[in-house]
Amino acid sequence: MKLPWWTLAPLPPDAAAGEAATARWNSLTKPPGSLGRLERAVTRLAAQQGRITPTLARVHIVVFAGDHGVVQRGVSAYPQVVTSQMLANFAGGGAAIAVLARQLGAELTIVDVGSVHAAHPLPGVLDRRVAHGTADFPQAPAMTAAQTEAALAVGAACVAA
């Protein structure tokens, strides 16, 4: 029996490639580390890809949305109805992530994995709800094992697509 991909240990990063990428950054005409997070992100990507200059041939951003049941306790800044509004805003191109995707020329996929109030079909949003929100976790587990596995399978399918 083949195990699901999310249960497998990831391959370790290539330390030599990461060190070489850092050395390359430091050889450029700029103060070492002056590009901050960008340098660290590219160095990590270099180590993950095992190459000094990593590439991003296909950028695909996936936003997964759902509602938390614990919101009933007043711990969230926004009510659950905002999730459905944000789903529409993501798909309509008005949210910051949609603008960023356009600027990058990236594909953007919006996936509803567990909203309470979204009315589907919602143009531009994949309805892959495994539940209508999670449970209030102080009262019960937020998700059942089956819901968790289903949500992970939704993510896996999006990555594989």
Image (cartoon, rainbow, N blue to C red):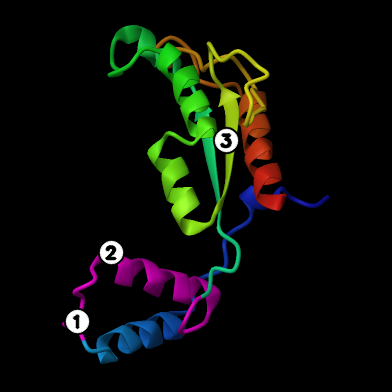
| Secondary structure of the residue carrying numbered label 1 | loop
| Secondary structure of the residue carrying numbered label 2 | helix
Distance of mark 3 from mark 1, alpha carbons? 38 Å
Q: Which residues are magenta?
A: 30-54
Asked if the magenta segment contains residue 125, the reply would be no
Disc 2: CA contacts within 10 A as few (<14), some (14-19) or many (>=20): few
Instruction: Answer with left or right where residue 23 lies relative to residue 6.
Output: left
Residue located 27% across and 89% down the image? 28
**Which of pointers 2 and 3 lies earlier in the amino acid sequence?**
2
Residue located 54% across and 54% down the image? 106
Q: Nearer the viewer, mark 2 or mark 3?
A: 3
Residue type at tag 1: Pro
Say whether marks 3 and 1 touch (CB < 8 Å): no
Distance of mark 1 from mark 2, alpha carbons? 12 Å
Q: Nearer the viewer, mark 3 or mark 1?
A: 3
Residue 47 placement (x, y as % from top left)? 46, 75
Residue 126 placement (x, y as % from top left)? 66, 30
Residue type at tag 3: Ile
Identify the residue under disc 2: 37
Residue 35 placement (x, y as % from top left)? 24, 71
Identify the residue under disc 3: 110
Identify the residue under disc 1: 32
Instruction: Answer with left or right where residue 9 lies relative to residue 140.
Output: right
**Which of pointers 1 and 2 lies earlier in the amino acid sequence?**
1
